[in-house]
């Protein structure tokens, strides 16, 4: 009898709990909703129960009916973004009120450890200017909000909800633990627009891109054998993070995506670019974007020793990232040639990444272009006696270092394919001249073409030049 009473009591608790609307973790107080759109709100209630939603910025209510499984969803029109605070009432007879809700632009950020790295840094791996971001946090309490998706795994089966998480307002303790790249992106953006920025960040260090892709996205670009091979490369399998950490948030309306990943795919230059393009295509479709309107900004992985500073796995992978850039509509890549550290794979310069991503958003979405934020890249070269003169494109106002200062990071080779450090100077508005006393008849030139090599070529605003070469000798180091 005692066991029967306990069972009846537990059953009552279960049904009592289900009598109140249950929301997914990503919908809650302090959230930022995407402006000027019909945002999705969804959750669970008792089967066939009426659900009424009332947002304080509007006069009318929206109502729907939960299906036989208790699932319900509505769309609510949002106004233009502002720093006003709102409430949302959701009721199936018992009311839930979401408070301190704001309207602005929402960005989805994802990747591995360099996106995951918090503002406070890690052991012996600091973030530059962390104190400034942490101690100024309360100034941004009504301007930036962040939801961090907890780590979770699910192989090829989409989860309906996150394992946990909540929307946090900036305060010293919360900012210290927020993604440094995501926070500095919002920090650099919010002071230049008239509405708050919401960030939903989903990251896991040491993970490969295929873990963040749906099976459909993988099957669109890889063979069955290639997919099977990827099961052997990491403990986290293909699709596991997409299913557990992307699928639960894909109904949440957003403006665009930020991506910082690649180190774990270093050496995967045969098809990383097509995997990235497929991932972006399917993510956009998940968010209801079939016209490539949601910008996708990603970060060039930074220079690092990667086991052998003189090897060239890193620049070869950057070339792969540049191929992805060329094949993804409405996309931009942040150059990070100047942020890397030889012995630390997690560079301290996170604000440079966030600031450059924010600059692309300001250019593309907020009418604040006109500055030279695109990295200069290789265009052509010619041999001039014992030197090679290289011409770059997208240089804007010009190149630096300035008059009389040497450009470092160039190497030259002759027919023997042996590369030697070169002396180089900015030759004209778009040109650099490089030569070496050890190469009398140069035939090939490389810039920053090592896993790690000091280099300093940039445009006038300090946007660094990515690695490039004039040869196609993949096996020559």
Image: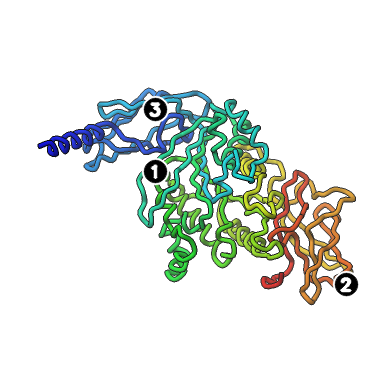
For label 2, count other residues whose C-alpha is less than 10 Å away and answer few (under 14), some (14-19) or many (20+).
some
Q: Is residue 274 visible?
A: yes
Q: Which mark is residue 440?
A: 2
- Residue at 89%, 67% (x, y): give it: 437
Cα separation between marks 2 and 3: 72 Å
Q: Position of residue 144 (x, y in %)?
A: 54, 32
Q: Which mark is residue 98?
A: 3
In the rendered image of this protein, does residue 57 appear above or below residue 447? above
* In this view, the mark in front (1 or 3): 1
- Residue at 26%, 37% (x, y): give it: 66
| Residue beneath disc 1 | 163
SS under mark 1: loop
Image side of residue 477 versus residue 291, left or right: right
Q: Earlier in the sequence, mark 2 or mark 1?
A: 1
In the rendered image of this protein, does residue 369 appear above or below residue 262? above
Label 2 close to label 3 by CB (< 8 Å):
no
Q: Which residue is nearer to you in this view: 269 or 327?
A: 269
- Residue at 56%, 55% (x, y): give it: 328
């Amino acid at each position: 009898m005692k066991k029967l009473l306990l069972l009846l009591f537990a059953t009552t608790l279960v049904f009592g709990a289900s009598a109140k609307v249950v929301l997914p973790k990503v919908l809650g107080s302090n959230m930022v909703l995407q402006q000027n759109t019909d945002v999705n709100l969804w959750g669970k209630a008792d089967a066939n129960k009426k659900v009424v939603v009332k947002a304080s910025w509007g006069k009318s209510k929206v109502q729907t009916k939960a299906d036989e499984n208790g699932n319900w969803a509505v769309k609510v029109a949002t106004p233009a973004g502002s720093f006003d605070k709102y409430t949302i009432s959701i009721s199936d007879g018992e009311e839930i009120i979401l408070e301190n809700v704001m309207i602005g632009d929402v960005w989805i950020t994802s990747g591995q450890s360099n996106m995951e790295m918090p503002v406070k840094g890690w052991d012996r791996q600091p973030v530059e200017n962390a104190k400034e971001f942490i101690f100024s946090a309360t100034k941004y309490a009504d301007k930036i909000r962040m939801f961090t998706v907890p780590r979770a795994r699910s192989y090829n089966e989409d989860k309906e909800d996150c394992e946990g998480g909540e929307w946090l307002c900036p305060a010293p303790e919360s900012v210290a633990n927020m993604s440094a790249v995501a926070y500095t992106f919002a920090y650099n953006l919010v002071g230049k627009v008239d509405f708050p920025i919401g960030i939903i960040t989903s990251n896991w260090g040491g993970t490969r891109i295929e873990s963040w892709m749906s099976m459909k996205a993988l099957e669109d670009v890889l063979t069955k054998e290639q997919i099977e091979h990827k099961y052997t490369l990491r403990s986290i399998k293909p699709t596991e993070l997409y299913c557990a950490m992307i699928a639960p948030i894909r109904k949440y309306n957003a403006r665009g995506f930020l991506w910082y990943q690649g180190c774990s795919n270093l050496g995967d230059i045969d098809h990383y670019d097509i995997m990235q393009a497929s991932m972006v295509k399917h993510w956009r479709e998940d968010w209801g974007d079939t016209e490539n309107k949601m910008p996708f900004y990603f970060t060039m992985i930074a220079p690092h020793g990667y086991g052998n500073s003189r090897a060239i796995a890193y620049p070869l992978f950057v070339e792969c990232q540049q191929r992805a850039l060329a094949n993804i509509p409405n996309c931009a890549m942040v150059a990070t040639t100047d942020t890397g550290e030889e012995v630390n794979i997690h560079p301290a310069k996170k604000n440079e990444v966030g600031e450059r991503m924010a600059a692309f958003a300001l250019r593309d979405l907020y009418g604040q272009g006109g500055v030279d934020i695109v990295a200069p890249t290789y265009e052509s070269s010619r041999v001039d006696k014992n030197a090679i003169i290289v011409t770059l494109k997208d240089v804007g106002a010009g190149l630096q270092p300035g008059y009389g200062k040497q450009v470092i990071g160039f190497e030259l080779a002759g027919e023997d394919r042996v590369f030697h450090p070169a002396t180089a100077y900015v030759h004209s508005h778009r040109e650099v001249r490089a030569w070496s006393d050890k190469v009398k008849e140069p035939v090939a030139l490389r810039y920053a073409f090592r896993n790690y090599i000091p280099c300093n070529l940039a445009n006038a605003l300090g946007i660094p030049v990515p690695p490039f070469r004039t040869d196609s000798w993949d096996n020559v180091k």
